[in-house]
Amino acid sequence: MKSQIALAVAGLLSATAAHAEPLAINADVVSETGAKNCWLLIDSENGDSILDVFTSEADVPSSAKKLKYEGYAYPGLIDTHNHVHYNSIPLWKPKSFFVNRYQWNDEQNKSPQNEEYFDNVVDIFKANMEASGDVMSTSIKYAEIRAIIGGTTIIQSSYYTKPPSLPIRNLTGSLVANSSNNILKIGNEKLQANAAKLKSKELKRYFLHIGEGRADDPVSINEFKVLRDNNLVTPGMVVIHGVALTKPEFKEMADNKMYLSWSPRSNINLYNQTTNIPAAIESGVTVALSPDWTISGSDNLLGEMKFAFDYANKTWGAANPVTPERLYKMVTTDAALTAGLEDHFGQLKKGFAGDFFLAPKLDQNPFVSLLKTEPKNISLVFVEGKAVYGDDARMVSLYNDVKEADLFTDKLEVDGTTKRICLFDDATCNKQRYKDVMYLLNHCLPKVAPLLETH
């Protein structure tokens, strides 16, 4: 899979700290059909895939170290759209709603309505992060910590050619193109070039902001026509937001095997509207859920799931297709499809990535339980078969002793609960400490967003 799609994997435990023997984890393993008690066999030293899945403990190799967990094992959540480089800046709450994305981020035409965005976000970003590579990379690291404490193991990024070493995978690389630019400014030549790459399979996915504005905004409505005029109504195209789209566009998307990445909290906070998900799903569009960013969206995918569920129930009533089961798919299997990763991610089975997290049973229905899960409840998060985050005691148990755990992991407080995280930099073989991340950010930014922010 790594030869097919460039996924930077970092922030992982060094070979000296990882358990030498395979690790067999027993839990109720969750899939689209429910939960089944199984043993997941992983080997953190020799590859990123699940070696096998057993239903009987008798089949577990005797050489494996066993970890029994009285709860659920979920596939790592996949965030298909996020601007993580901004996510160390505190939440921005607009005083009024906007018509489209160009209204609040138009630097050439500042107004009292959008000036607060530049004062609270852009000016801080340019003065402190854009001007310093060290601050930028540290800000990204902190932002991805904010994501991983909510069970996210893959996150979209589009702002660096080689991702810094982080305890999370990055959805980037030669087969995935992301653009947050105004589609009208990208230029027809580049749009058509990417359309040709999608057709030839040189490019597997192309993500573009389309229709990010109110349903009655002609500028937002016209953006789908721009896609069509540039041959981008085509398989592999991912529409980000799509708030202004209607059923005919969704039907066209479904017929052409396009995808949708939905960010309801950010949409509501900015435009007081979000995408017509009942129409999208009824049309057959594969929908993934994403926070957009923490500036106007959720802290992590768990928070976005809760917001989406509550909003959908209140808004769409009997027509609401956003069930707990559907939301689970939106952050796992359907997110993997949207990202072009369905062959190796989004499920826990033999040969798939060893990316998953353990969370307690807060409900007998695993999908409802996931909706009830808070970051403080997550017991362990694994990326490439290695524990990169989790409860203090559980993380320590994977090492020889507390002293060794202290060497490779750092403590942090998540909603009053003591956790540990590994920030090992595999590019330089140097280990950045969590306190160093916080020290730099606190001395460079006017205020650092908390790991979990009150909305």
Image: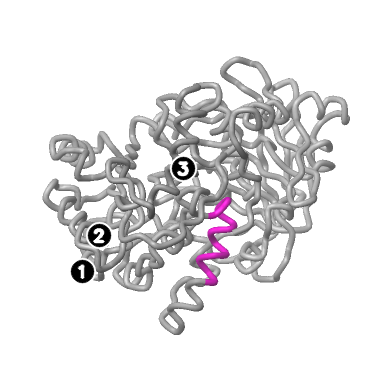
Is residue 408 rendered to the left or right of residue 200? right
Give, as a three-letter code, the residue at label 1: Pro
For mark 2, give the secondary structure: helix
Mark 2 or 3, nearer chain start: 3
Residue at the disc numbered 3: 119
Real-space Cα separation, disc 1 to disc 3, in angstroms? 39 Å
The colour scheme used to paint the residues is: one colour
- Asked if one can make out residue 51 in the rendered structure from this viewpoint, the answer is no
Q: Residue at x 74, y 20 (%)?
A: 16
Residue at the disc numbered 1: 248
For mark 1, give the secondary structure: helix
Looking at the picture, how far across and down is residue 25, in whole percent?
73, 46
The magenta region covers 298-310
Instruction: Judge by depth and name the residue closer to the eye, 90 or 244.
Output: 90
Question: Tag on residue 253?
Answer: 2
Per the image, is 220 magenta? no
Looking at the picture, how far across and down is residue 127, in whole percent?
48, 29
Give, as a three-letter code, the residue at label 2: Met
Mark 1 or 2, nearer chain start: 1
Is residue 316 rendered to the left or right of residue 452? left
Quarter of the figure that contains the C terminus: bottom right
Real-space Cα separation, disc 2 to disc 3, in angstroms? 38 Å
Instruction: Judge by depth and name the residue closer to the eye, 429 or 257.
Output: 429
Give, as a three-letter code, the residue at label 3: Asp
